[in-house]
Amino acid sequence: MGSGKSTVGELLAQRLGVPYRDTDADVVATEGREISDLFLTEGEPYFRERERAAVAAALAEHTGVLALGGGAVLDASTRSLLAGLPVVYLSLEVDEAVRRTGLNQARPLLAINPRRQWRELMDARRHLYTEVARAVVATDDRTPDEVADAVLDALELRDE
Ligand SMILES: Nc1ncnc2c1ncn2[C@@H]1O[C@H](COP(=O)(O)OP(=O)(O)O)[C@@H](O)[C@H]1O
Ligand SMILES: O=C(O)C1=C[C@@H](OP(=O)(O)O)[C@@H](O)[C@H](O)C1
Ligand SMILES: [Mg+2]
């Protein structure tokens, strides 16, 4: 959360001239409710199942850049679907994560004590991000444009 998947994903799609899609937006569109509302009224397992289905549908239909939510990799079937694809893990440190996500309340898992929550989530997930990623790109001291450049370099997609 806050590493720039949605922001950089859209930039990358523009640069590559391909469609962009974000599975969080797909869930919101299908459910007709915001993610924070889904967490609050239906609970996290409900959201995770919708997220799993949204990722599977997007990976089957979409050709372009796909941004996932930060917890999508918790699902083993999602990790299997990602195997072999050019997945990029956008990493960042806790200070910058809190700076970026503290400006809005859209992420229910960071609503209370965001610094501690973010650390705990990362400790639980870091190995999963590493497992599915073909490349890891640090985002801390980079603008979104610089991150997009670094992703293109890491995936050897630059046409220079
Ligand atoms: N490289 C960056 N530098 C500074 N701010 C960024 C960067 N990437 C994203 N942001 C900002 O951080 C917030 C979270 O970005 P977002 O793309 O929604 O991340 P994610 O989808 O990984 O949660 C947004 O306000 C976005 O504008
Ligand atoms: O890390 C997570 O568990 C989540 C990340 C969010 O997406 P971003 O990573 O795009 O913020 C969104 O799917 C939801 O709030 C849960
Ligand atoms: Mg996002």
Image (cartoon, helix red, strand yellow):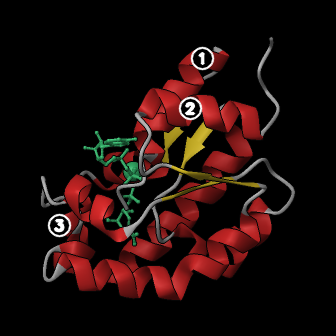
Residue underneath mark 2 = 148
Residue 111 sits in quarter = bottom left
Residue 33 sits in quarter = bottom left
Residue shown at 42% from the left, 45% from the top: 141
For the residues labelled 2 and 3, the Cα–Cα distance comes to 31 Å
Q: Which mark is residue 15?
A: 1
Q: Amino acid at mark 1?
A: Arg
Residue 121 sits in quarter = bottom left
Residue underneath mark 3 = 37
The percent position of residue 89, horizontal first and vertical second, equals 61, 57
Which numbered disc, 2 or 3, marks the residue closer to the eye?
2
Crowd rating for badge 1 (residues with CA inside 10 Å; few <14, some 14–19, many 20+) = few
Q: The C terminus appears in which quarter of the rendering?
A: top right
Q: Amino acid at mark 2?
A: Ala
Crowd rating for badge 3 (residues with CA inside 10 Å; few <14, some 14–19, many 20+) = some
**Do the residues under discs 2 and 1 have CB atoms within 8 angstroms?**
yes
SS at circle 1: helix
Q: Earlier in the sequence, mark 2 or mark 3?
A: 3
Please tell me which residue lies in front, 86 or 152: 152
Question: Which residue of the protein is positioned furthest toward the front in this rendering?
Answer: 141
Please, is residue 160 above or below residue 124 in the view?
above
Please, is residue 159 above or below residue 133 in the view?
above
Q: Amino acid at mark 3?
A: Asp
Residue shown at 51% from the left, 30% from the top: 146
